Image (tube, rainbow, N blue to C red):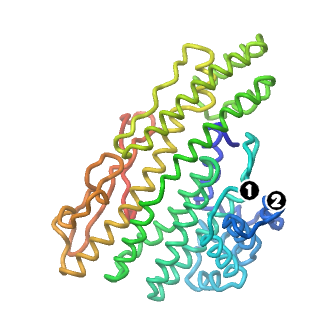
Amino acid sequence: MVGILNRAVLCAGAACALCAPRSPAASQAPEPLPTNNFAKLFANPTGQNGYEEMVRAGDILANAPVWRDYNNTIGSDQPATLQVKRRLVSDPLVRSALDTLRAGLKKPVRSPRASLDDEIIFPELMTFRPLARVLGVSMYVDMADGRVPQALDNLADVLKLGYAAQTDSLVSGLVGISVDTIAIRQLSEHLDQLSMRDCDRLLALVRAWLDLPDPAIPLIRFEKASMAFVWNKYKADPVKLLTLIKPQKDDPPLRKQQFENVRQELTANPNSAAALFDQARLMNTARFDQVIDSLNQPAWNRKPPTPIDQTTMAGVLAELMAGDRMLGTVLDRYSQEQAQIQMLGVHALIRHYLWEYGSLPGGLADLKLGKLALDPFNGQPFEFKRLEGTRYSLASIGPIDRNPAPGTIAGQRIPIQIPPKP
């Protein structure tokens, strides 16, 4: 659902659940019905909006039997062999999907939705990650056959898809990040195959990505507008709003109690909803404005928004609609993606140096990386360690763990390493 941040994050979590390995039971699911999101979204296609081809490509892939067969192997005890991967990327329907996608990525991309509505769904987002996965398989096959330049072409396509997917809400933002993660992981496992020329190409891709406008800012603005729409829409029907923000089973007791307090207030005094909603809307608007201002700062200088004053009923309702912790998690995901992309660029320069001098640099300072070497989470250089021979490690301190396990120390970091630790 659009416009309610905590609901958006839950939806995004469902989308990101696609990242998880499939259970064996998933392979026994009934045959899916043909997917036709294109017809749902584009009654009058223009041919000028690249999003049209992105959606059509997702439909083509979703309806390809070879993709469904391959998808059933993900997370199973018998992962796909190179032969199976070759068959996937050479299938005519799969190739048609990728050709269609690439045609769309060459065009301007804009949202197919002309208006705001809190009940909008995004069926096409579920098809973008499979497209990225197939491009990741293409990268693997290219690497296996020594076609590293072609693998980098596929990396460029994934990064374009991940950016272009972010058109409407934070749900699309998180899907875009998960799309990029597929290619980042695939390439990070084969960095030792990069030639000097490949290193230069990878660095160019990284710098081009870093030069793009921050996609989080327009998405936050969209959420701000959508939230205002929700407050105004449900002034006359506060009971329905309560069904939309009803706590989940795993929500903390405090949130459940807060919800119950609001429910009792609105049930006992339904005429108070208009004034209460106006106050809550102003609180949420101020929150979004603080976040947008913060996004214009380097990641390590960003400050969390001022906590909503929950001593009033309006404050409690505003917090239920858009919690601080959930928004912080979303922004962490953007910083994590930036760190991973930057580290690919640092790897490119390290390996370029290795080709040039036959040995590793003494430290990142030797490479004169500038901002590229700065970890988004603290503004300090990434952690670079020389290991045996020409082996080394590169890591970011990562985000603060916002969901620490019971008994652990609060405020601990979750390090990010590229390539990931085995």
Determine the secondary structure under disc 1: loop
Query: Does 118 appear above or below 32?
Result: above
Q: Amino acid at mark 1?
A: Pro
Q: Quadrant of the C terminus?
A: bottom left
- Whichever of labels 1 and 2 marks the residue nearer the N terminus, that label is 2
Identify the image quadrant of residue 413.
top left
Residue 348 x, y percent position in the rendering: 33, 72
Q: Considering depth in this image, is 403 or 278 the residue closer to the camera?
A: 278
Q: Considering depth in this image, is 346 or 297 the residue closer to the camera?
A: 297
Identify the image quadrant of residue 209.
bottom left
Whether residue 155 appears in this view of the structure is: yes
**Are dots 1 and 2 in contact, CB under 8 Å?**
yes
**Structural crowding at the residue carrying mark 1, measured as other residues with C-alpha within 10 Å and reported as few (<14), some (14–19) or many (≥20):** some
Residue pictured at 74% horizontal, 56% vertical = 123
Residue 342 x, y percent position in the rendering: 37, 61
Residue pictured at 32% horizontal, 57% vertical = 395
Q: Image check: 363 left or right of 4?
A: left
Residue 310 x, y percent position in the rendering: 55, 18
Whether residue 404 appears in this view of the structure is: no
Q: Quadrant of the N terminus?
A: top right
Residue annotated with mark 1: 123
Residue annotated with mark 2: 40
Q: Amino acid at mark 2?
A: Lys
